[in-house]
Image: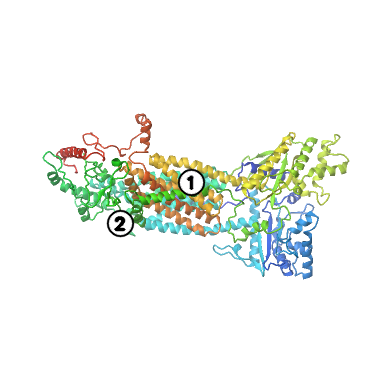
Amino acid sequence: SFFIIVLITIIGFFTNSYGITEETSYVWVIPDGRATLDYEATLDAQDRAVDTPLERQNAFTLNGGGTFWMTFDFERNADIFTPENVQTMCEVEQLFLTIPEYQDFCILRSDVRQCIEATETISFQFYGSATTACTLLSAANVTAQATRLYNALDSPDLQERQAAAFFMGEDTLSRNPRFTSITRSRVQLGTPLEGFISQNDDLSEQQSEYIGFYETVKDEFFDFFGLKSQFLNSAYRQRVSRGDLRVKWYSPQLQSIEERDTILEDLYLVSISIVFVYAWMTYQMSSLFLATMAMIQIVLSIPVSIVVYTHIFQIPFFQFLHILVIFLVLGIGADDVFVFYDGWRLSEHNSDVTSVVRSGMDGTAVLESRMKIAYERTFSAVFNTSFTTIVAFMATAISPIMPIATFGILASTCIFFNFVFVVTVFPSVVMMHHLWFVKRNCCRFREGSEQSSSEKKAGEGAKAPQPLPNDAMMEYADQKRESDTKKDFDKSGLPNLHEGQAVPPPQAEIKANGGASELKASERHSTVAGTVGRPSTALQHTDVALAIHTTTPGLKKEPTASSDGSGEGTRESDGNGNPNLEDDDDIDEAEMTLLDKFVYKAYLPVMTYRVRGVPVLAVCVTLGLLVFAIVAISAASMLGPPPEQENFLTEDNMLAQVPSELQDDFIRGDLDPFVEVFIPFGIQGFERPGFNRFEPGKNRGNVVFDNDFDFFTPEAQATFNRACALAATYSCGASACQDGRLFFPESIQCFLPEFQAWFLNRTGITTTDPSLTREHFFGNLSEFRVAPPADADGLSQAEKQAVIGFIDGELRYVRIDTRVTALSRSSTSELSEVRDATDDYANAVNGDAPDGMNNAFSSSAAWVGVEAEFGIVQGFFIGLILCFPVAYVVLVLATSNFLISFYAIISIGFIVSSVLATAQWRGWNLGVAEAVAGVIVIGFSVDYVIHLGHMYIDASHTRGLKSRLERFVYASKKIVATVLAGGITTFGAALPLLACQLTFFPKMGTLMASTIAFSLLFSIGFFMGLALLIGPVDRIGDITWVLEKIGVAPFLERYGCLKRNPHAPEPQKDIDGVEMVQRNGSAAKTIEMIHRTASAAKTLADEEKTITV
């Protein structure tokens, strides 16, 4: 199997399965969302409306990504326009404008194939040309040009005023005399690139070419300023300046490159997580060999999962979010390994193994018995936790956001293969370790770790046994049998019992043999005043086994569940009512890890500490966590979508600073900071034949036009003009809208009034004249579309080609372009309100429109973002809705008890609320990291409570323990240390994320660490506290108990659908078939039952000589 794993890993390398997918602008959108479909239909229609390459280059600019920004800050708080500063700013601009590849990406003029002039640059404003030698200008020249710009702020001409305001800081107008200490430059690039027919044509390839170009830009700027990145310290985080002039630059492509490079650098921190997990596993398992093989197994599960994810599931998408799988797998894989190892370690003390030893079989049989016990325990425990965690992550697979969905699929695949490797590969590793190292007493870190005394005894045979604790008890019973019979039985065969008489247990003899007490809970004995305990598994080969455990001097018995209904077990206690927590099957102190010692010496004494019989500390812990959970629920309910697009770069990174500075620190001279909206007519929808959501940059789809659209009719033209007039006056009640208006009137681009005036001036008739032919109308409209603007306020050629959609000589759509009065950086909820207002506007236009013109809608890139943000939130809550019921079903199946499962699911809910409250307290919103972490919480928290709940019920089903205290102590000793070990592993694996540069990773590290901390806290604190205080006793809450109460158990048993657990606590019967007295029975009944039992035992002892009393 190991060879197959390595082979699959190698195949992944040769098939390029481990590469990171290139980023595209469509990765984080919902492909079948209405906003996305509308926006892509608008863009695709626009792409198809261009006929020649020259027009195509000039017609559009790449949304956001086609703009390169430079900002300058004069830190003396004085006028930035000095000769030295102007020269420096010019030199910085030339770095970009003189790159040879710039000619392949610039916007081209429509008449000649040359780059348009970059007018929004300092070079153009002060030197008269965007490309220049940047000589040092005279002070008079610089002052004159600066004065011109300052005076233009008062110009009546809107375009001139906006052009000057572009370069001014927001406080320029309030200063007297006017000056600005900051300014900026902008160079816009074009699309589609050479060899592509539209902006959407092979979008990922065009994006890749842009990335290559900006790689060159990055190198040029780094060389010019002498920048160099260091480990965990990007060059973009360094201060860049020339004298007192601070320089920054930005483009979305540069941000993508920086995020990619930062991710690759942050990946080095994975090695720290691996080292920590490796060291912790080595300590916990006391074996370098086991830790090494376990780590190899865990790490190799990742490439195997990626190969299956890529080639079997056909998902060729892998980005930075998926890297988190490494940290998850380290924690979960180590947890599964600990569960199996602890099962193997504890199997040595199992009574079934002791039976094999007594039978005289060799060491191989003992190993087989141990492996069977460990395997059965591990398979059910790891399967339950793995299944629930897989379901939790698969719940994200239904997320409408593709990266989150694929992350859930990959994480589920990794967890599945971890489970497979733990139950197939690791058992072989454990057996190899036992045979190669343990039997040779080699390479153990702690004395007594995994001492195979049972195998040693079996190997030495029955001639010279090395007594185990169970053997010591048997030996003691054999030695005392005949003398006890003579001494303690009267002539009638009934025991001679005297008040206060106690049969001394064989502790001294066990001690003399050098063994620790290994009696299981099922092998322990009840008091003389109680019932006779059920025989141990090791003794079931005898016909009858009866053990009487008497009191120890100085200790008294606690009441039992059946004696007073309190659910307290039969445990020795001191005079203050605190139970004696020592059991016969406790681990030797030499074998204990730190976590074992914590459980035995700290956790159990604290949780079971009593004042007047009440476990006061357990009550305080449970109530304290309950109050905290209520507060956390209140805080978590306040989480909402992020107010703006998430930025994963650190705050001191210039690529994170510039976008906010552009919108906050400069005069909004133009309307660029406001949301741009398109209102098309004639578009019916968008279809995606052959589209693969896992390859978002390919085969995006095609626009579908409305065949009833006919712009020639007077009714259609009247509808369009009415829509333009309505837009100028339409009100908006959303909080993000300014002055109660939905659109800026000056932003509304309605071509029809301009065309009608142009047409009337040219032909002398109106566009609705009855004598006008269809051919004449569309011919003139086509000419108007490419004609230069009639005046400065007219639409440019590029703008007219975008809003008048001629495709193959036929007009297929027309469009109104405008901007709403809401800023692009408004919160998601605010923009959602504005989007609703634009939808209301479109519905008002469509209300009285003729066929073909009644399909107007509002499309915008901002609406796509709003839809994606709400999609993240929607996917998160859908995941929760799916996970909780599945988790509860798995809990019920794993524990077979409805009540303990209910406590567990409440605990899980509190854990999720606490983690989300942590995000809210940190000032975060319900973004990508929080949505993913919310589902991770369920997976991890279910893991812990399912282990604890299963062991609590297991105390009853396999050991016959009825009371809360006995079950609590049993579960705590058996599994709490294992849960803590797994939690510490995942917690430690998450800590290196806090040192990452990409803010997404520290945020995820915080949330993952919080998840583990709260999962452990609520699991061993709140959940186990509930189990101790109000947990089920006897069979209350068990599936069979519930079925009996509702009367369907006999029916199910009749048809074989229900089997009763033979070890479940039932009213025990004596040898003659008569029910034994309950612990609250009278003393007379107790004595009578003991006499009857002893009489039967004596009879059988005389016949077969195999009975232990």
* Residue beneath the point at 50% across and 55% down: 1006
* Observer-nearest of 459 and 508: 508
From the image, tell me which residue sits under label 1. Answer: 412
User: Residue 484, percent across and down?
Assistant: 14, 46
Question: Please, which residue is most extreme toward the front here?
Answer: 612
* Residue beneath the point at 43% across and 47% down: 943
Q: Amino acid at mark 2?
A: Glu
User: Residue 906, percent across and down?
Assistant: 44, 44
In three-dimensional space, the C-alpha distance between marks 1 and 2, rounded to whole angstroms, equals 39 Å
Callout 1 secondary element: helix
Q: State yes or no: discs 1 and 2 in contact (Cβ < 8 Å).
A: no
Q: Is residue 854 visible?
A: yes
Callout 2 secondary element: helix
Q: Label 1: how many residues lie within 10 Å, few (<14), some (14-19) or many (20+)?
A: many
Q: Is residue 64 above or below residue 565?
A: below
From the image, tell me which residue sits under label 2. Answer: 589
* Observer-nearest of 1010 and 171: 171
1 vs 2, front mark: 2
Q: Label 2: how many residues lie within 10 Å, few (<14), some (14-19) or many (20+)?
A: few
Q: Tell me, what colour scheme is on the image?
A: rainbow
User: Residue 290, percent across and down?
Assistant: 38, 55
Q: Amino acid at mark 1?
A: Ser
The quadrant the C terminus occupies is top left
Q: Is residue 50 visible?
A: no
Classify residue 433 as left or right of residue 136. left
User: Residue 1041, percent across and down?
Assistant: 35, 35
Question: Please, which residue is most extreme toward the left here?
Answer: 491
Q: Based on the displayed image, in which of its 4 quarters is residue 981 positioned? A: bottom left
Q: Is residue 111 above or below residue 714?
A: below
Whichever of labels 1 and 2 marks the residue nearer the N terminus, that label is 1
Question: Please, which residue is most extreme toward the right here?
Answer: 764
* Residue beneath the point at 45% across and 55% down: 987
